[in-house]
Amino acid sequence: MTEKRTNKNPLKGLFNYEWIVKNISFFLFLSALTVLYIANGHMADRTIRRINTINTELKELQYQYKTLKSEVMFKMEEEQIVKAVEPLGLKISKEMPTRITVSSVK
């Protein structure tokens, strides 16, 4: 028995010009999907960078808020208020306040 060898490449018929022309719409679809995938990745990166920037700004604003709040709380203490108004000549009254009553006339 003689063996017949064929040197045919199984992929030879698969990638010919006619097959590529038939499937050009599929290649265009795959290309569009690839572009959308890359664009989506870039938008996600940009969004993550923006979120990180906003988080750092938020932390800075929180530090400023806490600092200002502690300063205001310190200045609202009675001793600090007394020190602040002494140059104006104001002093804490030692007398009890008097109550004013208004009698209604009928």
Image (tube, grey):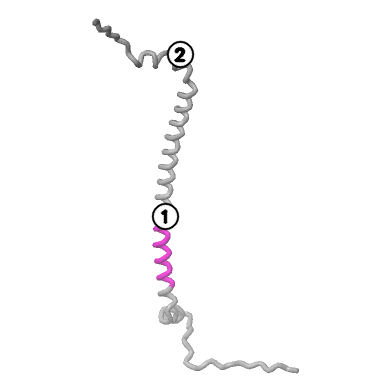
- Closer to viewer: mark 2 or mark 1: 2
Label ID, residue 70: none
Residue placed most toward the observer, 32 or 48: 32
Q: Which residues are magenta?
A: 59-72
Q: Residue 82, located in which quarter of the rendered image?
A: bottom left
For the point 29% across and 9% down, the residue is 7
Q: Earlier in the sequence, mark 2 or mark 1?
A: 2
Can you identify the residue that label 1 sits on?
57
Q: Quadrant of the N terminus?
A: top left
What secondary structure do most residues of the magenta stretch adopt?
A: helix
Q: Residue 4, located in which quarter of the rendered image?
A: top left
| Residue 36 on image: x %, y % | 46, 34
**Residue 6 vs residue 19: left or right?**
left
For the point 47% across and 16% down, the residue is 21
Kind of residue indicated by mark 2:
Glu
Badge 2 element: helix
Q: Is residue 48 above or below residue 87?
A: above
Q: Mark 1 packing: few (<14 Cα in 10 Å), some, or many (20+)?
A: few
Residue placed most toward the observer, 9 or 61: 9
Instruction: Specify whether residue 61 is painted magenta.
Output: yes
| Residue 87 on image: x %, y % | 45, 80
| Residue 2 on image: x %, y % | 24, 5
